[in-house]
Image: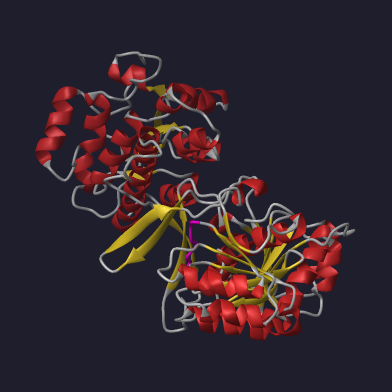
């Protein structure tokens, strides 16, 4: 039954709206009873549906079922509950207008001043691996309709879509009502909430209708929620913030265990470190500085502590540049790795987990930021990059999980087929190369980088830089180039430094010249047929 009618003209054209009647229907029951108690204590009539009504009633609070208001029971397995004029009229009535109040009185409809609704767990259902009708049934219809109606009518109604907003609403109830500014802010959150929900639904349908050979989506909507305002952006005069994307499972969803506030550049470098370390199958560590690797390595054979071994070997590549670097490990950070880092200034360490003893060691480095990846961490399937006036979308550049599949289509164009050990090094160098800014040259030995040349405007300079950084370690190492060599001068720099094998995409008009240089030197060379630019 509807509660007693109130004279709403008493607060027409006033900023504050006293809450007398609330519609509450939530899938997320977090702190629901805290809110219900505050409403009940203030004498607010609570109208509710299904499991929400049952939870409030079981806690001992009075609640009116929506069906008692509409005169129609829930139907179609709960698909239709609130889609009724006595609900939406009560939500949408603009009580600043005498004619709206008159119509409600004629129809016997009592208005709502508060709507508390959060939507079916569609995103969570998709993330759980559900498919088909199980996902479709989590597409909310009545919920978004109520949320949008209340948000549109924020002049009269407060709309709450998250338990995080309950404290503010409870304070407003205790202080006599909601203010216009508060209701407008809640409306903004509500529209963002339904926009994100619709985006998730549209994205699920788009992914389900595109096969591998299809075009990319004709329409792309990206919804993100601000996680934190950063001290500044890339530079101190730029504003910065980090946003989390609906359905994301990456660096933006990592949990910070200790250390100073993350900066814009910390996030950029941490993401680059993930890109480098998580391409490797064996325990691996990548050290990043200014979005480029100072070193990447997998564990040494028979190492007692594989992840600590990988870190030491990555650090040996370029200890000078590693100062102030960002580290990513693709396995649990151990006590031994933590002890190895005690005297090395490091900005951030990212890992799936940390041994408790390692965390104790890191406590002495209070500014060191530790990020633990979410349990469901995964590499993105698509890459998005903003450009002025729009954005670029592409498939993520990924390697097969099976290490043997990486080289199955390589073409041997010079020298003899290498040993299994040297082949493993070539595959390692090729995968490491993907994490290096173009033009990229990687020298590797024993599954660890010994020299990295990156970001140069010509490939021969990258070769010189990689060789210079490797020093004596260049002799006997293998090399990878992310794109073809346009001339033989680049490979010749590597050959003169003692490189034994080179892997590169091929495809230059001067490929024969490049191959001839390798043949004359007795150096093995493979063409991969694909490149790995990373700009």
Q: Position of residue 21 (x, y in %)?
A: 35, 35
Magenta part, dominant SS: loop
In this view, the residue in front, 196 or 101, is: 196
**Front-most of residues 99 and 118:** 118
Which residue occupies the foreground of this view, 42 or 147?
Answer: 147
Q: Is residue 269 above or below residue 175?
A: below
Is residue 99 placed above or below 50 in the rendered structure? below
Q: Is residue 130 magenta?
A: no
> Residue 337 versus residue 478: which sits nearer the camera?
478
Above or below, comparing residue 480 to residue 135 in the picture? below
Q: Most extreme residue toward the left, as rendered?
A: 99
Q: In the figure, is residue 107 to the left or right of 68?
A: left
Reply yes or no: does residue 534 show up in magenta: yes
Q: Which x, y percent locates residue 116?
A: 40, 38
Q: Quadrant of residue 135?
A: top left
Residue 507 placement: quadrant = bottom left
Residue occupying image coordinates x 73% and y 80%: 345
Q: Is residue 292 visible?
A: no
Give the magenta-colored segment's residue range. 529-535
Left or right: residue 113 compared with residue 373 = left
């Amino acid at each position: 039954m509807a509660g007693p009618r109130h004279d709403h003209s008493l607060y027409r054209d006033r900023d504050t709206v006293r809450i007398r009647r609330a519609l509450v229907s939530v899938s997320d029951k977090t702190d629901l009873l805290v809110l219900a108690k505050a409403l009940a204590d203030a004498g607010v009539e609570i109208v509710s549906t299904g499991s929400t009504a049952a939870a409030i009633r079981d806690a001992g609070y009075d609640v009116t079922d929506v069906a008692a208001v509409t005169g129609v029971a829930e139907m179609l397995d709960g698909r239709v509950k609130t889609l009724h004029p006595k609900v939406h009229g009560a939500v949408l009535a603009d009580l600043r207008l005498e004619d709206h109040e008159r119509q409600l009185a004629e129809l016997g409809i009592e208005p709502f001043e508060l709507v508390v609704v959060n939507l079916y767990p569609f995103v969570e259902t998709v993330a759980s691996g559900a498919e088909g009708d199980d996902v479709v049934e989590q597409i909310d219809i009545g919920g978004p309709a109520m949320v949008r109606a209340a948000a549109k009518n924020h002049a009269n109604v407060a709309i709450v879509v998250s338990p995080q907003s309950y404290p503010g609403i409870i304070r407003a109830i205790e202080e006599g009502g909601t203010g216009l500014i508060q209701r407008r802010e809640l409306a903004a959150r509500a529209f963002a909430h339904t926009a994100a929900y619709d985006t998730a639904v549209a994205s699920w349908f788009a992914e389900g209708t595109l096969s591998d050979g299809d075009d990319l989506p004709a329409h792309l909507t990206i919804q993100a929620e601000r996680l934190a305002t950063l001290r500044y952006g890339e530079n101190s005069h730029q504003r910065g913030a980090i946003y989390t994307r609906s359905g994301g499972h990456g660096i933006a969803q990592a949990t910070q265990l200790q250390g100073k506030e993350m900066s814009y550049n910390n996030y950029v470098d941490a993401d680059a470190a993930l890109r480098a370390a998580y391409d490797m199958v064996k325990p691996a560590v990548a050290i990043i500085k200014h979005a480029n690797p100072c070193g990447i390595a997998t564990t040494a054979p028979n190492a007692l502590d594989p992840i600590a071994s990988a870190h030491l070997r990555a650090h040996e590549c370029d200890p000078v540049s590693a100062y102030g670097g960002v580290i990513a490990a693709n396995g649990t950070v151990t006590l031994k790795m933590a002890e190895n880092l005690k005297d090395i200034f490091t900005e951030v360490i990212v890992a799936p987990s940390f041994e408790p003893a390692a965390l104790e060691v890191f406590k002495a480095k209070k500014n060191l930021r530790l990020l633990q990846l979410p349990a469901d961490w995964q590499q993105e399937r698509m890459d998005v990059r903003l450009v002025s006036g729009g954005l670029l979308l592409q498939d993520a550049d990924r390697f097969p999980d099976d290490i043997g599949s990486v080289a199955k289509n390589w073409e041997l164009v010079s020298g003899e087929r290498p040993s299994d050990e040297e082949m493993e090094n070539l595959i390692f160098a090729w995968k490491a190369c993907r994490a290096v800014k173009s033009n990229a040259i990687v020298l590797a030995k024993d599954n660890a980088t010994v020299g990295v040349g990156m970001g140069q405007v010509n490939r021969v300079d990258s070769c010189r830089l990689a060789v210079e950084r490797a020093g004596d370690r260049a002799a006997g190492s293998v090399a990878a180039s992310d794109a073809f060599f346009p001339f033989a001068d680049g490979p010749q720099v590597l050959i003169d430094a003692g490189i034994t094998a080179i892997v590169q995409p091929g495809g230059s008009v001067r490929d024969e010249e490049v191959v001839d240089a390798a043949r004359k030197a007795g150096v093995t060379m493979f063409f991969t047929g694909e490149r790995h630019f990373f700009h």
